[in-house]
C-alpha cells in the first residue's frame, strides 16, 4: 500500500512534504513566535525542541541502526543522511512541535491539522526510503510521550522557575543541560565503537559518519543559552510595536546572527573543539532569548 501511494507523487514532492518535519523550520518558527507573538510559547517550544533533539541524537547513536537505503541495494532515497535511523527525527519532533502549537491555540481543528501533518511527515520518510516503518513508529511514540510529559510537567517547572533566584535558575539550567550533554557523549562513544560496513557506504552512495558528538553538545548548549537569557531578562520583554512593519523587522535583524553562529560552530569531535561548540551554542541561544530582544528594545521595534 505504501509503495502504491508513493508512486502517485514524484520524489520531489515527497521530499518537499518531508520538510514539515525539519528541525531548522521549527527553530526559525520558534524564535519568530518568541519575538513577535508570545515569549512564553516561544520558550516552551524552544525547550521542547532542544529536549526532543537531544533525546533523538542520544537514541540514534545508542541504538546505531542503519537506514534502509544503506542496507538494501537499489533503493533511491529522497535525501542523503549520514546519521543512524532509529528513531526518525522527522517522526519524533513534529508531534512535540505541532502538538504544543495545537494546545496553545485551544481549537479542536488545530489538533486534527497537527495529527495530519505528523502522519504525512512520517509517511514521507518511509516512502522516501530514509527510514523503516519501525523507525518512524518509534519516533512517533517517543514524540507523543515527550509531548505528554512536557504538558504534565510544565506547571511544576514554571513554579520552580518563579520561586527561585536568578542564580538558582541559571545553575539549574546549566546542570540540566550538562546532564543531557554527558548522556549524549556517552552515546557518541558507544556509536564510535560500532562498525560502519563498507556495503552501507556502497549502497548509500555517499560517506557515512553517524557519530555526531558536536550535535549532542550544541543542542544542550542552545537550551542553556536560551534559559540563561530568560533568567537575565527576568520577564522584561520588549513591548510589541503597534506598527506591524516594525514587528516584521525583528526576524530580519534577529535571524542572521543565529544562522552565522550555527554555521561557524566547530563540528569536530575533539575535546577543545567541543568546548568551542558549546560556547557557540550558548551564545546563539543567549542571543535568541536575551540579545535580540534587547536590541529590539533599543531600536523601539
Image (cartoon, rainbow, N blue to C red):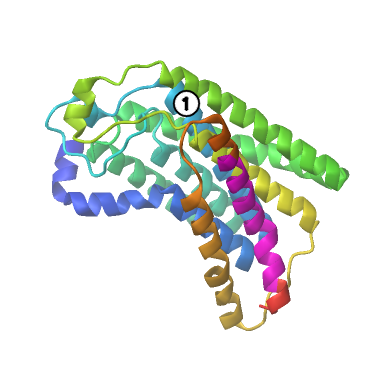
Q: In this orientation, which residue lies closer to the viewer: 275 or 255?
A: 275
Side (left or right) of 279 relative to 95: right
Side (left or right) of 126 relative to 32: left
Residue at 57% x, 49% y: name it.
100
Residue at 65% x, 28% y: name it.
179
Main SS, magenta region, reads helix
SS for tag 1? helix
Q: Is residue 283 magenta?
A: yes
Answer few, some or many: residues within 10 Å of disc 1's Cα (few below 14, many 20 plus, some between 14 and 19).
Answer: many
Residue at 30% x, 33% y: name it.
131
Side (left or right) of 192 relative to 132: right
Q: Is residue 123 magenta?
A: no
Side (left or right) of 10 relative to 217: left
- Which corner quadrant of the image does residue 295 belong to? bottom right
Quadrant housing the C terminus: bottom right
**Residue 60 horizontal/vertical position (percent):** 43, 27
Magenta residues span: 276-296
Quadrant housing the N terminus: top left
- Which corner quadrant of the image does residue 273 belong to? top right
Relative to 161, say whether 234 is above or below. below
Amino acid at each position: 500500500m505504501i509503495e502504491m501511494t508513493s508512486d502517485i507523487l514524484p520524489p520531489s514532492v515527497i521530499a518537499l512534504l518531508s520538510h514539515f518535519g525539519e528541525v531548522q523550520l521549527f527553530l526559525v518558527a520558534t524564535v519568530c513566535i518568541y519575538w513577535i507573538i508570545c515569549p512564553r510559547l516561544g520558550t516552551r517550544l524552544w525547550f521542547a525542541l532542544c529536549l526532543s533533539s537531544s533525546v533523538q541524537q542520544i537514541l540514534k547513536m545508542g541504538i546505531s541502526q542503519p537506514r534502509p537505503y544503506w542496507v538494501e541495494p537499489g533503493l533511491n532515497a529522497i535525501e542523503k543522511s549520514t546519521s543512524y535511523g532509529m528513531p526518525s527525527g522527522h517522526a519524533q519532533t513534529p508531534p512535540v512541535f505541532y502538538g504544543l502549537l495545537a494546545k496553545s491555540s485551544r481549537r479542536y481543528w488545530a489538533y486534527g491539522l497537527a495529527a495530519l501533518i505528523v502522519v504525512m511527515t512520517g509517511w514521507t520518510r518511509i516512502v522516501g526510503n530514509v527510514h523503516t516503518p519501525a523507525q518512524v513508529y518509534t519516533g512517533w511514540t517517543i514524540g507523543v510521550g515527550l509531548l505528554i510529559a512536557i504538558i504534565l510537567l510544565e506547571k511544576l517547572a514554571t513554579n520552580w522557575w518563579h520561586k527561585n533566584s536568578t542564580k538558582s535558575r541559571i545553575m539549574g539550567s546549566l546542570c540540566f543541560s550538562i546532564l543531557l550533554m554527558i548522556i549524549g557523549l556517552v552515546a557518541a562513544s558507544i556509536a564510535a565503537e560500532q562498525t560502519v560496513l563498507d556495503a552501507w557506504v556502497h549502497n548509500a552512495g555517499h560517506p557515512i559518519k553517524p557519530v555526531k558528538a558536536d550535535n549532542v553538545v550544541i543542542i544542550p548548549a542552545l537550551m542553556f543559552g536560551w534559559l540563561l537569557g530568560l533568567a537575565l531578562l527576568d520577564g522584561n520583554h520588549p513591548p510589541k510595536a503597534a506598527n506591524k512593519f516594525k514587528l516584521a523587522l525583528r526576524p530580519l535583524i534577529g535571524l542572521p546572527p543565529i544562522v552565522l553562529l550555527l554555521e561557524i560552530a566547530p563540528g569536530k569531535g575533539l575535546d577543545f573543539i567541543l568546548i568551542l561548540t558549546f560556547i557557540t551554542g550558548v551564545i546563539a541561544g543567549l542571543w535568541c532569548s536575551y540579545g535580540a530582544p534587547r536590541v529590539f528594545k533599543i531600536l523601539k521595534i
